[in-house]
Image: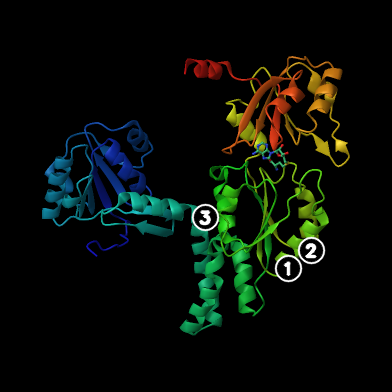
Amino acid sequence: MQYLPIHFDTRGATILVVGGEAAAEAKLRTLLKTEAKIRVIAKSISPEISRWAAQNKLQHIEREFEASDLQGVSLVYAATEEDAYNGEIADMAAARQIPANAADYKDACRFITPALVDRAPVLVSIGTEGTSPALARALKADLETRLPPSTGNFAFKTKTLREKVKAILPDLADRQRFWAKIFSEKNLTEQLRLTSLELEAQVQAELDGEDTEAGKVLLVGAGPGDPDMLTTAARRALHAADVIVYDRLVSDGVMELGRREAEYIYVGKTPGEPSIGQQAINDILLQKASEGLLVVRLKSGDPLIFGRADEEIDALQAQGIPIQIIPGITSAAAAAAAIDASLTTRGTNKAISFLTGHDAKGFAEQDWASLARPGGRAAVYMGVGAARFIQGRLMLHGAEADRPVTVVENASRLNQIITYTTLKNLPEDIAAAGIKGPAILLIGYAERRAKTETRVAI
Ligand code: SAH
């Protein structure tokens, strides 16, 4: 170990940064979070650094660096845009026993700054001694997703609870066992997301010798299919799950992210085929959560749009099972993104309806008169089989035959298909394109002309 990682107390310290452009700015982003007084010496500074100076977050001295500037400072960052000059400044600092860092000049550095995952007061610093900055960045990105923003609060809360636990468990080994149990490895990420009150309740229950293995159901949006369109919270939930209860439209790519050891339960409903009933799904969720397991109920898109979420929420809440909802990108949003269309357009539509083509009784009736008005726009879910019905109803209520309709099948997935058509040709064009679903019908949305031209130009 060539470099010793230490956490430097910045209270009362003055940190000198020489330079005012990109390299200095990068260092300052971290330094400004400390409690040190920050002094920047540079003839000119970037707009971002000027803003910080104007906010009194740092002191800017507008001139070239001089040796006397090293007087009374605790640390030096030589961060001009000239590597050799940075090296010289670092050497001058070293001669005065002041630790210095020279930007982009590792050999001249007396210390280097690690990649940082900042959940203050919890700090994870990652250093590779310069061997692989890319690996450090990858590790940082990985930890960033796994440590929720609440980690810092969690640490503060633990601090207040430590006294309480110490009073009841005076023996150190007992206390270590106690805290190890609280931080049980499997669900560490979930644990870190607990609110202060939940943590306090858990610690109290554990002290009282109660069974603290309470189950929970997370209702998670799996997005339209592309795993990159999952929220970070959804990824975390998938990593932590004991049980994953999933629907037909949840993509394989998303399923890949589930914890390997989790139990997987498929509860997909295929249109027109006998499949598992809603009651049976509710029962599975209740059963697994009452066993103290962390259940992830994974639904395509957003769980609260055409996902029968309220039936599951009601059933769970009636039994006192805690639930938490993690929203997802709904397929209408992904379909609009696939065709570069804004769902709302100033002056064109002040509202957009999310409709279902089917409901429990068959084809779904809607407020057709309002949808048929000029400029009416809607995103239709489960609309492929109902296309002729929707066309008929809209035209009956006076919608123009040439109103544009865009159909996006498998939005965001590798097998995505886009068909631009009109109300008049909707059912025929859906059939001609071989679209069977899952698809969204975007009524009132045309192909962007600019996009067509680009395509022609290619
Ligand atoms: N909760 C989901 C909708 C579930 S209803 C959401 O927010 O997206 C099922 C319907 O969603 C399908 O019939 C289809 O209309 C739509 N759908 C789901 N995934 C889709 C995708 N990748 N592309 C297009 N439509 C999709």
Mark 1 to mark 3 CA distance (whole Å): 26 Å
Q: Which amino acid does label 2 sit on?
A: Gln
Give the image quarter of residue 4.
Answer: bottom left
**Mark 2 neighbour density, 10 Å: few (under 14) some (14–19) many (20 or more):** few
Q: In screen coordinates, is 93 left or right of 319?
A: left
Q: For mark 3, what is the residue?
A: 148
Which residue is found at the position 39% from the left and 51% from the top? 138
Q: For mark 1, what is the residue?
A: 290
Mark 2 to mark 1 CA distance (whole Å): 9 Å
Q: Where residue 99 sits: x, y (%)?
A: 20, 55
Which residue is found at the position 55% from the left and 58% from the top? 239
Regarding ligand 1, which quadrant of the image does it lie in? top right
- Mark 2 near ligand 1 (CB under 8 Å)? no
| In the image, residue 457 above or below residue 16 | above
Q: In screen coordinates, is 150 left or right of 432?
A: left
What colouring method underlies this structural image? rainbow
Q: What element carries label 3?
A: loop
Asked whether 319 or 444 is in front, the reply is 444
Q: For mark 2, what is the residue?
A: 319
Which residue is found at the position 61% from the left and 78% from the top? 207
Asked whether 224 or 189 is in front, the reply is 224
Disc nearer the start of the sequence (2/3): 3
Q: What residue type is labelled 3?
A: Pro
Q: What element carries label 2?
A: loop
